[in-house]
Amino acid sequence: MRDLVTARPRRLHDDEGNIRVSVDVEDSPPLWFSVAADHAELLSDRADHVAVALLLPAMRYGRDLRIGGVVTDSLLHRLNHDVQALVRDVHPQYRAVTVTADERAPALATASGVATGFSGGVDSFATLTEYASGAGVPATLRVTHLLNNNVGAHGDGGRTLWRRRVDALRPVAADLGLPFVRVDSNLDEHYPRMGFMQTVTLRNAAVMHLLGGGIGRSYHASEGTFRHLRMPPPHGDISLAGAMLFPLLSTPGLTLESTSSGMSRIERTLALVGRPYSRYLDVCIDADSDRETNCSRCWKCMRTMLTLEIAGRLDDFVPDVFVRGPYEARRPQYYAELMSSVEPNDIELVEFGDRNGWKWGALARGRAAARRAKRWARERARVLR
């Protein structure tokens, strides 16, 4: 198959006055990222972000990757070795490729900025609490910038939903006195038939390399705890390998870190109780850009609400953050889904309920057993084939 070839990155101004870093890609639309002109000083002149952004599509379709411009030498080396080895452990169907660049150079000096992604979710709040508002954090580790990236997480709601979510979170950044950097992109167009959770780590890492001109350290909220780390992660969820992958995507000038792995998802959720910013909690995956609160029926809403209810704290979040009606209507079905799941966070939640004497009900247990039997039969049939 033909190589995946890019030109050198160039900077343009879009119709809204933002700075767009665009890269021509052979046989594909240009790849672009944009930030407000106020944050131009954060942008790197290198093409590191292009190499990170396009590695997975190149591996998925078996195309050697040729990057126009300058790529940091240590990053290029790791993209050709350990990064691909880890990716292929997660996605065995992906192929080994060769990544080259027009030029390679040592890493630039480390910039002073410290950034963390802030989506309003449970995990991002945990990182924010520890590194932005927590006591005793060394100055070199304290967050200086909040980020929110549009790299494909917003489903059918797309850019409209993303902008609405960002606007809803601006008061938190303002109250903390931190700049809120909004990074838009068309990255998702370059990930055909590639799931978001199966590729999220490199999508977000690409943004950090884009901002490497002003950011020298970035925090990425982990999906699970240290005890959940395993290879391969369930269902190709590469975010569960973040603690291993982010260091491999770092350079001497830019450190990428996975954070909050010392806390379980339950601990992170309950840490929001009584917090002044908890009213901004947004865990929902509903793509409706007009929704005013979390939908209270998707699996992420259900997991969060059930955690709070088992702990006796759901009333603290109703009706401003969640609403009871959709949750209570779907709860019996969700019990069966939860109790039959092999996902680490789901198993942890069932154990949390059992420890607290939660009554799941005989019907839910029967449905869960049926779901497990059906899954076992499918897996057995696949093995026999």
Image: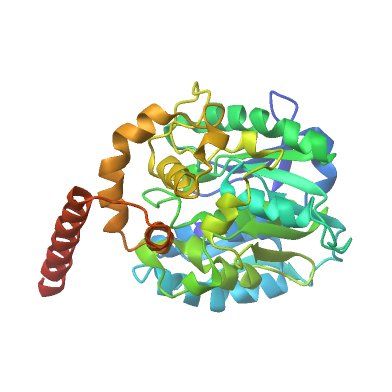
Residue nearest the observer in this picture, 117 or 97: 117
Seen as rendered, the residue at the extreme front is 357
Seen as rendered, the residue at the extreme top is 290
Determine whether 104 is above or below 167 in the image: below
Residue 237 seen in render: yes
For this view, does 49 lie left or right of residue 321? right
Q: Where does the image place residue 182, in percent across and percent down from the top left? A: 69, 38
Q: Where does the image place residue 262, in percent across and percent down from the top left? A: 61, 68
Give the residue at x 30% y 45%: 334
Give the residue at x 82% y 40%: 176
* Quarter of the N terminus within the rendering: bottom left
Give the residue at x 63% y 62%: 260
Residue nearest the observer in this picture, 343 or 215: 343
For this view, does 93 lie left or right of residue 21? left
Q: Where does the image place residue 89, in percent across and percent down from the top left? A: 42, 75
Give the residue at x 16% y 54%: 366
Determine whether 53 is above or below 34 in the image: below
Residue nearest the observer in this picture, 37 or 123: 123
For this view, does 220 lie left or right of residue 65? right
Residue 5 seen in render: no
Determine whether 174 is above or below 59 in the image: above
Location of residue 17 by image quarter: top right
